Amino acid sequence: MAEHEQDAVIGRVVRECADEGRRAVTLQSEARYIGDELSRLAKFLHEHPELITFDNDSSPPEFFRSHNCKPEEFDSIFLDAAKIKQLCIAIRESMERHLRLFKEKQKFGI
C-alpha cells in the first residue's frame, strides 16, 4: 500500500473511531436519562401513584388542588420496552465498533 493510501486509511480509522466513541457516549447518556426517569417514576409509584400523569393527560385539576399537590408528569416513551431494547442493542453495537476501530488504530501505532 502506498504511503498516501495508508495515510488515508489511518485518517479514516481515526475519524471513524472518534465518531463512534461520541455516538456510544450519546447513546449511553440517553440510556442514563431514561434510567433516571424510570427511577423517578418508581419512587412515585411506590410513594404517591395518585400524582402520576402521562403525556399531559387531562386529569381533573380539582384533584390536585383539593389535595394541595401538583402532578408529576412523565413521558410514556420511558415505558416503551421495544425502544429501550433497541437502545441497549445500539449501545452494544456502537461499543463493539468503537473497540474494533480502536484496535485497528493500535495496529497503525496510533
Image (spheres, rainbow, N blue to C red):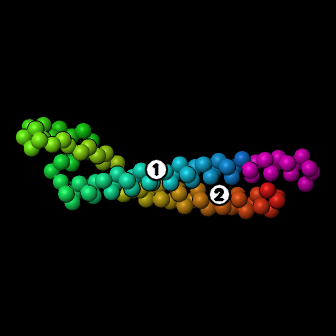
Side of 93 relative to 75 (left or right): right
How crowded pointer 1 is (Cα within 10 Å; few <14, some 14-19, many 20+) is rated as: some
The one nearer the camera, 15 or 32, is 32
Give the structural element (helix, strand or loop) at label 2: helix
For the residues bearing labels 2 and 1, Cβ distance under 8 angstroms? no
Three-letter amino acid code of the residue under disc 2: His
* Residue under the point 68% across and 61% down: 100
Quadrant of the image containing the C terminus: bottom right
Q: CA distance from mark 2 to mark 1?
A: 18 Å
Q: Is residue 60 above or below residue 23?
A: above
Measured from the top left, where is residue 37 in percent x and y?
34, 51
Q: Which residues are magenta?
A: 1-14
- Expressed as whole percent of the image width and height from the top left, the position of residue 53 reads 22, 45
Residue 99, compared with residue 58, is above or below; it is below
Q: Is residue 42 above or below residue 56?
A: below
Left or right side of 20 for 84: left
Count of marks placed on residues: 2
List the residue tagged with mark 2: 98
Residue drawn at x 54%, y 61% as measured from the top left: 92
Using residue 35 as the reference point, say whether residue 6 is left or right of it: right
Amino acid type at mark 1: Glu
- The one of 91 and 51 positioned closer to us in this rendering: 51
* Dominant secondary structure, magenta: helix
Picture quarter containing residue 85?
Answer: bottom left
Does the segment drawn in magenta span residue 7? yes
Which of the 4 image quarters holds residue 105?
bottom right
Q: Residue at x 92, y 50 (%)?
A: 3
Q: Quadrant of the N terminus?
A: bottom right
Name the disc covering residue 30, or none: 1
Residue 3 in sight: yes
Could you tell me residue 47's position as x and y percent? 19, 57
Farthest residue, direction front: 68
